[in-house]
Image (tube, rainbow, N blue to C red):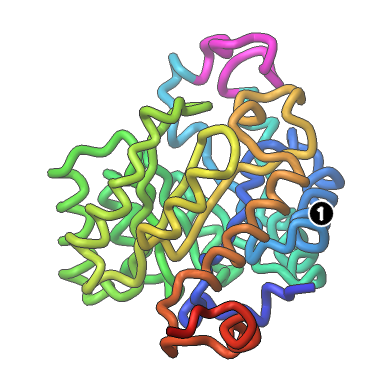
Amino acid sequence: MTVAADRDPDTLTAPYVIAEVGCNHAGDLALAKRMISVAAQFCEVDAVKFQKRHPRTLLTPEQYAAPHPNVMHAFGATYGEHREFLEFDLAQHAELAEFARECGVAYSTSVWDVPSAKEILGLAPPFLKVPSATNTNAELLELLCADFGGTVHVSLGMTTRAEEEAIVERFRRHGRLRDLVLYACTSGYPVPFEDVCLLEVTRLQETYGRDVHAVAFSGHHLGIAADVAALTLGARFVERHFTLDRTSKGTDHAASLEPDGLRRLTRDLRNVAKALTFKPAEVLPIEETQRDKLKWRP
């Protein structure tokens, strides 16, 4: 079994695979641990990622008090209560980080706001993610540039080119470009294939690839073919939402991979990465027997 702790993303030829648990744990710590265990041991991913939000910071009083827009997926009487229900506190995140370490997989989280980032900084994960929704939060980006020693992964879903350039320039000013990972992403759940826009990986690689830590791909589509294509276009990190059951309550499950899908994705990415080479010799050793047996000789 591949042990994620042995896979340094700086030296990998195959993408670093991240299982985005997100909020698919439904606020259940035991379920979150089970998901870590399955992702690490059965799917053989490199990292599991959660989310940390401070709902009263992110939401206006009106948004907090409003009903969930899709009541069948609500875990509270209001949208704010729903978001609070899905939150783990810092002690629980620390417990998840330790459990992930015991399972041989890296722990990380998306941080949606400054209070959440300040809490998670103390856990010193190898990387933190800034979601597409809050990648224009200057205070959040400034905090991570100044106080976080790991790599900062930034998703670029629903982001204009001007906003994208401002993000990169901020990291440049702080001398942190080599710690920045930019994700090609379309923010939809799930995303039809015509909106996946895989060539964004190529564009980001051509525009920023020589300056940033890496270009990556975060997919919310169905199946696993697009992720393999993203690898061939230059993505070094691949993130997919992960669930144990796509029919579970919650809005992210429909755009998530179940364990067998994630296992196949990890396998295929690593196998295709092995195949993305030129022939080191005109005739390979594996071909010699067939050449002697079958090659036409004039």
Q: Quadrant of residue 251?
A: top right
Is 96 inside the magenta-drawn segment? no
Say above or below: 129 vs 70.
below
79 vs 130, left or right, is right
Specify the quadrant that holds the N terminus: bottom right
Task: Give the number of marks.
Answer: 1
SS of the residue under disc 1? helix
| Mark 1 lies on residue | 38
Say above or below: 8 vs 78.
below
Of the pair 253 and 94, the residue shown nearer to us: 253
Point out the residue furthest to the front here: 298
Q: Position of residue 155 (x, y in %)?
A: 38, 48
261 vs 42, left or right, is left
Point 69% across, 36% down: residue: 24
Point 45% across, 44% down: residue: 112
Say above or below: 245 vs 200.
above
Q: Position of residue 111 (x, y in %)?
A: 49, 50
Q: Inspect the image, locate mark 1, and give the three-letter code of the amino acid beneath it.
A: Val
Q: Position of residue 161 (x, y in %)?
A: 16, 43
Q: Quadrant of residue 42?
A: bottom right
Point 28% across, 70% down: residue: 212
177 vs 60, left or right, is left
Say above or below: 17 vs 34.
below
Is the residue marked by circle 1 packed among few (<14), some (14-19), or many (20+) residues within 10 Å? Answer: some
Point out the residue furthest to the left here: 162
Specify the quadrant that holds the C terminus: bottom left
36 vs 132, left or right, is right
Q: Position of residue 144 (x, y in %)?
A: 37, 63
Of the pair 101 and 204, the residue shown nearer to us: 204
Residue range of the region highlighted in magenta in the rendering: 64-80
Point 60% across, 66% down: residue: 270
Of the pair 168 and 280, the residue shown nearer to us: 280
